[in-house]
Amino acid sequence: MELEPDDIRPLINRAKRAHGHLAKVISMMEEGTECEDVITQLSAVLKALEKTGFGIVATGLQQCIAAGDGPDSVDVKKMEKLFLGLA
């Protein structure tokens, strides 16, 4: 399953924001910022990446269904593996 960049533009933007946010977390660690503040920001990065991953799986599933003969055309095991890889 290949994803078209135009179809996942919001997910790409979310990943880019998470990338920038992670850079800030690294800077906070290098500057000796309070542990609680670093963990709070790192948690936000992790949530953003999780949402991005689940969005990619959801988009891929929609594309598989649209391209095939409905839900029966989806490789359920493959989609399950992708989904569980994020869990």
Image: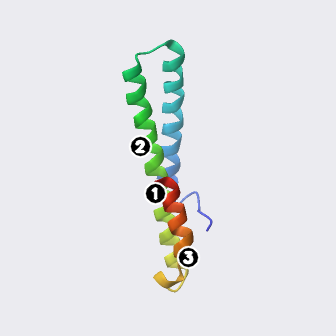
The residue pinned by badge 3 equals 75
Q: Which mark is residue 55?
A: 1
Q: Earlier in the sequence, mark 2 or mark 1?
A: 2
Decide: is 66 above or below 87. Answer: below
The residue drawn where x is 46% and y is 64% is 58
Position in image of residue 75 (x %, y %) = 55, 76
Position in image of residue 26 (x %, y %) = 53, 24
Q: Is residue 70 visible?
A: no
Count of numbered badges drawn on the protein: 3
For the residue marked with disc 1, what is the amino acid? Gly
Of helix, strand and loop, which one carries label 2?
A: helix
The residue pinned by badge 2 equals 47
Of helix, strand and loop, which one carries label 1?
A: helix
The residue drawn where x is 49% and y is 59% is 84
For the residue marked with disc 3, what is the amino acid? Asp
Q: Which mark is residue 36?
A: none
Decide: is 3 above or below 69. Answer: above
Q: Is residue 20 visible?
A: yes
Report the front residue among 17 and 27.
Answer: 27
Decide: is 81 above or below 20. Answer: below
Position in image of residue 16 (x %, y %) = 53, 40
Q: Earlier in the sequence, mark 3 or mark 1?
A: 1
Report the front residue among 82 and 69.
Answer: 82
The residue drawn where x is 50% and y is 67% is 80
Spatial separation of the CA atoms under disc 3 and disc 2:
27 Å
